[in-house]
Amino acid sequence: MKKVAVFGNTGGGKSTLSKKLSEITELPLYVLDKIKYQDGGKEVQYEKYRKVHGQILESEEWIIDGYGCLETLWQRLKVADTLIYLDLPLTTHFLLVSKRLIKGLFKNPEGWPKDSPIIKSSLNSYSILIACHKRLTPKYRKYVEQSRDTKDVYHLKSIKSIAQFLARIETDYF
């Protein structure tokens, strides 16, 4: 486990898992939302984002949390030696987005740039949930199945399986 891509639909716990995984493994963590967006939620220039993303992919070790954009997503999944796909039921994603919205009114969500527009971004997450579920989820599932022979693949389908995964990794590292 040297190059780890953590991905899945919005609100699935990618940032929380990635942070804990980084703490356990001591691999450097790169949060794409913090690379792609400035404080306050304004998007950085696309070329700047792509350049930084490419530099991360060329490094020896990393955990990359998030989506970024379609182009860099598939580049990252190809280069990663470990795939962690959070594929929770759609209703769970909805509940977690709602929880993040409510908590975000009091504290910036994990992995979000400082002063992000919490309400606007959270409301946008609801439409992303549906679009991702229809368009990307089937492609993600196919990709992880095809990658099992060449990569370490963790296809986590519940909150419980996420907790079990982290406990197993913690045991392996200590």
Image (tube, helix red, strand yellow):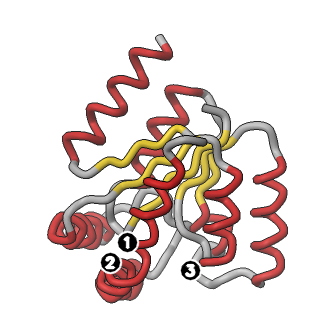
What's the amino acid at mark 2?
Answer: His
Horizontal and vertical percent position of residue 80? 65, 48
Tell me the residue at 72%/80% (across/down): 44
Residue 41 — which label? 3
What's the amino acid at mark 1?
Answer: Thr
What's the amino acid at mark 3?
Answer: Gly
Horizontal and vertical percent position of residue 50? 78, 72
Q: Residues within 10 Å of mark 2 (few under 14, many from 20)?
A: some
| Rendered view: 163 above or below 141 | above
Quadrant of the rendered image containing residue 41: bottom right
In the image, is 98 to the left or to the right of 51? Answer: left
Near-viewer residue (6 or 83): 83
Circle 3 or circle 1, nearest the eye: 1
Tell me the residue at 59%/44% (across/down): 4
Q: Which residue is mark 1?
A: 137
Secondary structure of the residue carrying tag 1 is helix
Q: Which residue is mark 2?
A: 133
Q: Residues within 10 Å of mark 3 (few under 14, many from 20)?
A: some
